[in-house]
Image (cartoon, grey):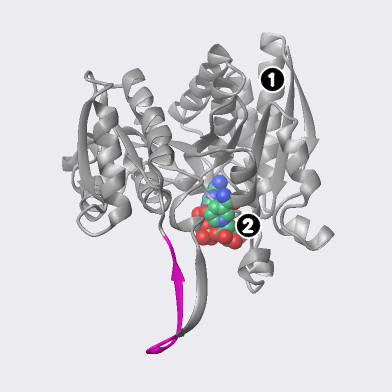
Amino acid sequence: MDYKIALVKGDGIGPEIVDSAVKVLGRVGEKFGHSFNYTDILAGGGAIDATGEPLPKESIDLCLESDAVILGAVGGPKWDTLPGHLRPERALLGLRSAMGLYANIRPAVLYEALLSECPLKDSIACEGIDMVIVRELTGGIYFGERGRGEGPMGPEAYDTERYSVTEIARIGRIAFETAMKRKKRLVSVDKANVLESSRLWRETMHMLSADYPEVEYSDMLVDNAAMQLIRKPLQFDVIVTSNMFGDILSDEASMLTGSIGLLPSASIGSGKLGMYEPIHGSAPDIAGKNAANPIATVLSAAMMLRYSLGLEEEAVCIERAVSRVLKDGHRTADIMGDSKAAPLSTTEMTEKIIENI
Ligand code: NAD
């Protein structure tokens, strides 16, 4: 089969890690008889430099014409002082919104070979951490009305959290369906003791739970969830939550697995088109040094094969290769632990993964 893939390499380490994913996909294509045709898309800081805006319309159109989008990361200190609407990160929000990608699926798996990288005590049983966070992606406070003004106490600013039943129900269905394919356990995280939007979130999730009697469903307040992730992470299988809570909790969960450089994500909507990206940022501190861990992006490509292209066997093949490479003791700098051995570079780690496919 032939597939059209849009590549948003982005800024910082983005181009290096996207190149790794492309090389790995090349090997998968050879093995399984697929061809992946790529289009480079301008978005983020590079787009600001070239066109004056973070997400040119042409970039959106090209993404919409593709079967899937792979994104490295956008942003960096060079663009940090620009006003909000011109920041590189606007490209992410713009793409997610234009492509209707309302669900972000973030697995957090601690590989057996990396148990020592889990920052929690052994007694908390890091072994077995394997959860998925389903985060709402195109609504809530990140997209709500915002502004600045003059209030009774002087200058002030506000952002608004607003959710409709439709938005909550569609992310809820993805979460329940995800739970059905796993251990059939779902926790919905909200702040229903304070926020009206969370109360609607909770009511809607309860309504949906009636359609999934096999799923063991529960609610948890976000402050408690932040604590429980550290206290007893093994209680979680699938978590569903709003845009902002998901943003924060998924980064917290990622640290349980040892490195942010390991974790992929899929942003999906109602159709097949999706965007696949590592959960980390553009890591300006290591950009251009061939030192980034490419695994998060390579595993994002595997999620693309699974969710957008329906190539399950090929996706599993990449995931097994990554697992084998880690089991064989190969490490990039971010997952070296106390080892005194020389870390693998981005390109060396990529080669190891390819050798295992
Ligand atoms: P970051 O994720 O870029 O980096 C945090 C730390 O993790 C750094 O020490 C970095 O070196 C390390 N790290 C990240 N990815 C790694 C990898 N693959 N291998 C090894 N180490 C890795 O977060 P930050 O420093 O807060 O943000 C840097 C820039 O990225 C900012 O401009 C931010 O806005 C942007 N950002 C973009 C995205 C995105 O494009 N999706 C997400 C988060 C942050």
Whole-angstrom CA distance, mark 2 to mark 1, is: 33 Å
Residue 239 lies in the magenta-colored region = no
Marks 2 and 1, the one that precedes in the sequence: 1
Badge 1 amino acid? Arg
Apparent side of residue 241 relative to residue 187 in the rendered image (left or right): right
Q: Is mark 1 within 8 Å of ligand 1?
A: no
Residue 152 lies in the magenta-colored region = yes
Q: Which residue position is annotated with label 1?
A: 27
Pick the residue in front: 82 or 121: 82
Residue bounds of the magenta highlight? 151-160
Pinpoint residue 89: horizontal percent, then vertical percent. Answer: 61, 57
Q: Residue visible at 66% across and 59% down?
A: 88
Residue extending furthest front? 165
Secondary structure beneath disc 2? helix
Pick the residue in front: 218 or 250: 218
Q: Dot 2, how many residues are within 10 Å of its Cα: few (below 14), some (14-19), or many (20+)? A: some
Q: Which residue position is annotated with label 2?
A: 90
Q: Considering the image in quadrants, where does the N terminus appear?
A: top right
Pinpoint residue 275: horizontal percent, then vertical percent. Answer: 60, 36
Residue extending furthest left? 123
Secondary structure beneath disc 1? helix
Q: Residue visible at 58% across and 38% down?
A: 100
Q: Main secondary structure of the magenta part?
A: strand
Apparent side of residue 66 relative to residue 327 in the rendered image (left or right): right
Pick the residue in front: 334 or 58: 58
Name the quadrant where ligand 1 sits.
bottom right
Residue 7 makes an appearance in the image: yes
Q: Residue visible at 54% across and 23% down?
A: 307
Mark in front: 2 vs 1: 2
Apparent side of residue 149 relative to residue 99 in the rendered image (left or right): left
